[in-house]
Image (cartoon, rainbow, N blue to C red):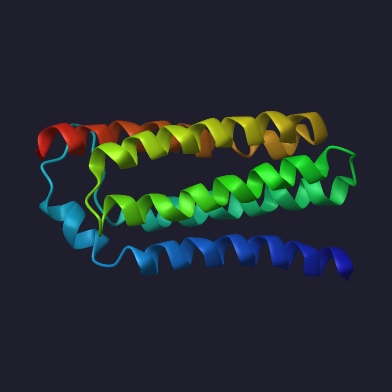
Amino acid sequence: MKSRNTLIFFLGGTLLLGFLSGLLSMNSAETYAAFIRPPLSPPGILFPIVWTVLYLLMGMSAFLVYESKSSGSSQALLVYAIQLGINLLWPIFFFPLHLYLFSFIWLLLLLYFVILMTVLFYGISPLAAYLQIPYILWTIFAGYLNLGVCILNK
């Protein structure tokens, strides 16, 4: 029972932060549609689907690390929380504030913390780390899209 509640906490909390990020970056779909976008840009409808899956994978990974009771889990979960905070702020910088270059640099900071989190997770639970591979790949792709928008929409 306790493990189930802990899993719900990690999954629900992570999804809630993602939802909050979406709320704070109002009209992002309209803004995205108005951009001149780089090649390979996906349709806007794909973003909430992908982010929901990524947030679920993040929450599952954090749960696995927490449940491991490893001596390194506190540090790994701190990095997890930091990257969630960085992730929460990116769409605000990008969409309502239109800080495209700053957002790209912020995304590089996010990528650093996602990779650091993944490395720390790997030392505790390889499965938790492997679940972060889609997040790393999507963050790199988001960097490409962000930089493309920055260059194409001066």
Q: Quadrant for the C terminus, please.
A: top left
Judge left or right: residue 11 versus residue 104: right
Residue appearing at x 65%, y 46% in the figure:
80
Judge left or right: residue 26 versus residue 37: right
How many circles with numbers are drawn on the protein? 0
Judge left or right: residue 3 versus residue 79: right
Q: Quadrant of residue 122?
A: top right
Where does residue 32 sit, x and y in percent of width and height? 20, 53
Where does residue 109 sit, x and y in percent of width and height? 47, 35
Q: Quadrant of residue 38?
A: top left
In the image, residue 19 above or below residue 153? below
Q: Quadrant for the N terminus, please.
A: bottom right
Which is nearer the eye, 53 or 89?
89
In the image, residue 76 above or below residue 98? above
Where does residue 102 sit, x and y in percent of width and height? 31, 39
Where does residue 130 sit, x and y in percent of width and height? 65, 33
Residue appearing at x 36%, y 34% in the figure:
105
Residue appearing at x 60%, y 47% in the figure:
82
Residue appearing at x 33%, y 36% in the figure:
104
